[in-house]
Image (spheres, rainbow, N blue to C red):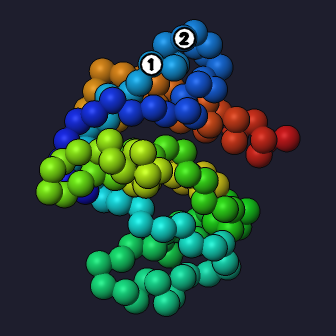
Amino acid sequence: MESFETDIKLPFLESIASNPSSENETPFKGVFIRAPVVEKILASQEGIQAGEAEKPDTVVAPSKQAQQEAPPEAVNAEVEVLATVPKRNQQTGDRKEFEKAHEHDIIAVRQGNVFGTSFHPELTNDARIHVWWLEQVRAAVIRNSG
């Protein structure tokens, strides 16, 4: 995916407990800088996805370090797609034709306690993703403490 900015809908932000207003339904300004793409979600399995990891230009998550440090239930959790954008026609730059065809690029995912995006939320003045993530961390601490 190339660099661009666009308004994106992030349904997971609608769950922010600290701000239940309609602001959570406002599109988020997505800043994509030479954005990586999640090309496919692999079936959950224990250990490294060795066959996939051997393919050139492929990154398979979670990393070996995450597998060593994270609790097994987090590493073995299913990958949840949190947000997508319509694919873009490389010749025309248009997204409408792909939106109508329901063809999308995955731009936000979560697996257990790992969260990843293809855009840079830190480059906006919108703190909703950071608030959402802190709420996720708080909930995990509460779950694991008792």
**Is residue 105 left or right of 123 when viewed as pictured?**
right
Check disc 1: other Cα within 10 Å, few if <14, some if 14-19, many if 20+. Answer: some
Identify the secondary structure beneath mark 1: loop
Numbered tag placed on residue 82 in the rendering: none
Q: Where is residue 61 in the image (x, y as percent from the top left)?
A: 49, 68
Image quadrant of residue 89? bottom left
**Is residue 71 left or right of 116 when viewed as pictured?**
right
Tell which of 88 and 35 is nearer to you. 88
Q: Position of residue 108 (x, y in %)?
A: 46, 48
Identify the residue position indicated by label 2 in the image: 22
Numbered tag placed on residue 26 in the rendering: 1
Tell which of 51 and 75 is nearer to you. 51
CB contact under 8 Å: marks 1 and 2: yes
Quadrant housing the C terminus: top right
The disc labelled 2 sits on which kind of residue?
Ser
Q: Against 11, is 76 above or below?
A: below
Quadrant housing the N terminus: bottom left
Q: Distance between the residues labelled 1 and 2?
A: 7 Å
The disc labelled 1 sits on which kind of residue?
Thr
Tell which of 84 and 74 is nearer to you. 84
Q: Against 82, is 74 above or below?
A: below
Spot the residue most to the right.
146
Which residue sits at x=68%, y=68%? 76
Check disc 2: other Cα within 10 Å, few if <14, some if 14-19, many if 20+. Answer: few
Spot the residue most to the top.
21
Q: Position of residue 90 (x, y in %)?
A: 19, 57
Q: Against 93, is 29 above or below?
A: above
Q: Position of residue 130 (x, y in %)?
A: 46, 30
Identify the secondary structure beneath mark 2: helix
For residue 63, say whether it is visible.
yes
